Image (spheres, rainbow, N blue to C red):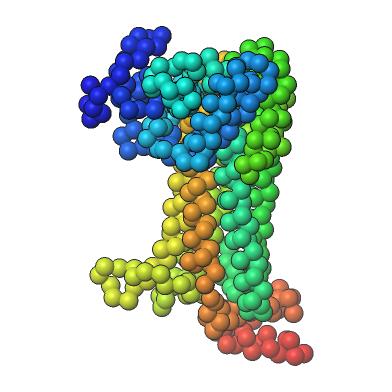
Amino acid sequence: MIAGHGPTRQEVDSIGAHAVPAAAVYGIQTQRAVELYPLEGAAGFADYPLLLAAMLHVKKAAARTNIEIGAIEAPMGQAIIKAIDDLLARIPPEAFPVHAFHGGGGISFNMNINEVLANLANARDFGVAFGTYAPIHPNDHVNANHSTADCFSTGCHIAALAAFDGLSQEIEGLAADLDRLGAEWTPLRKLARTCLQDAVDIGFEDYLGGVASCLRHNLARAAQDAEDLRHVSIGGNIIGRSTDCDPGFFALIIPALNEQLEAAGLPAALTRTGNLYSASQAHDPLLALAGSLEQTARTLIRFAKDLRLMASGPHGGLAEIRLPAVQPGSSAIPGKVNPTIPEFMVQCGMMACGRAAAVAMTADHGEMDYNPWEAVVVTGLLDMIAILTSGVFTFRRNCVQGMRPDAKRNTDNATSLLPSLIRLKQLKGYSYASAIAKEAAGDVDFVRRKVTEAEAG
């Protein structure tokens, strides 16, 4: 008996015999992974449904291809396909309990799927008990002509592409929100600052347009990195060797996979990567996307902190903009409202950057012919995308779209001492403006009168 699991069944692998919960749809290798890599509150395989679905689609394309080339008998292949379709319709989380970043380069992910598919297919189509693995075996049939390395890597690319699409739409939506607000707030001027000190006056459309441009630049770079993920390594079984699968499988698997993905509404148009050995040695395309998204996260942090600063007050701060009041800001100060939505965006950005740091570290530790850290890469990247998507979603709808400028405050600031002296310099020259600054001795009304005179004259 396994503690907390009730009755068990005995299964055997190359290590030896081991107990598996009798009702478990997974098998011995999954059970070993569950015991060796306890979750302890961390995420599991089932917490990444896009990755799980992507790998199932790879398995389905593989089964179809294996039937076509005669690598597995049609009844067994069709049984595997039916099991995959059942899982894609409803994935039971309890069937995929493996720790998100177990050791071994994703082997436990892959074997978890292989065992589940073998058990479901055998039980449904051949009436045999879980753990029998006959006639369909997890390795011999479900895993035929591919391996963890190429199946997992290809699934990672598909999942990241699919996830990125949602984030891309939110970031482009935020940039569009800023364009709209800049147009709405024209011709209102605001005080620009350098080193947090007064500088010159600009339009709100100038500031907001600058942020929108940064976001779009980051997004364009990330989108190109995401497009590179369409180059996949399926067919490069062991350290990138294509000779470890049937030549017919190698030729047909990508067209079959593209057909499968297109029918499912997932990113398709996949091609084989130019060097399969490179794909085994490193996961640079995924790392590149994580790097682009880290820069995007930092841009979002900067903008959110700008809003937090510009909304500071309402009486003792800058108070240039008013953010929507979404919740009370203090348990002790009546009437206090904090900029919690920008702060949420900042925290999302920080957490995304933390994931990016972990992802980047994997490049330093992929020795020799195989980088075994892709589970850290893909879970970190998918976490980044999910965190940023959630952050931008609420940042847009609960803050940016409802924020408003304080017209009087901004007009006063935009015509304050330094902006007025800059205007005077434009009209009369630096030496004249310097003399007026000295004569004014900080009297902004005096400087404003001189500006009016210069503009009239």
Residue located at (73% from left, 76% from top): 426
Residue that appears at 44% across and 62% down: 341
Residue at 31% from the left image edge and 15% from the top image edge: 10
Of residues 47 and 431, which is closer to you in this image?
47
**Residue 325: percent from the left, percent from the top?**
42, 72
Residue in the foreground of this view, choosing between 313 and 392 = 392
In the picture, which quadrant includes the N terminus? Answer: top left
Residue sitting nearer the eye, 292 or 259: 259
Looking at the image, residue 128 lies above or below residue 268: above
Locate residue 287, reporting x and y percent: 58, 34
Question: Based on the displayed image, in which of its 4 quarters is residue 2 positioned?
Answer: top left
352 vs 58: above or below: below
Residue in the foreground of this view, choosing between 14 and 124: 124
**Spot occupied by residue 150 in the image (x, y as percentages of width and height):** 59, 23
Is residue 82 shown to the viewer in this render? yes
Residue 19 sits in which quadrant?
Answer: top left
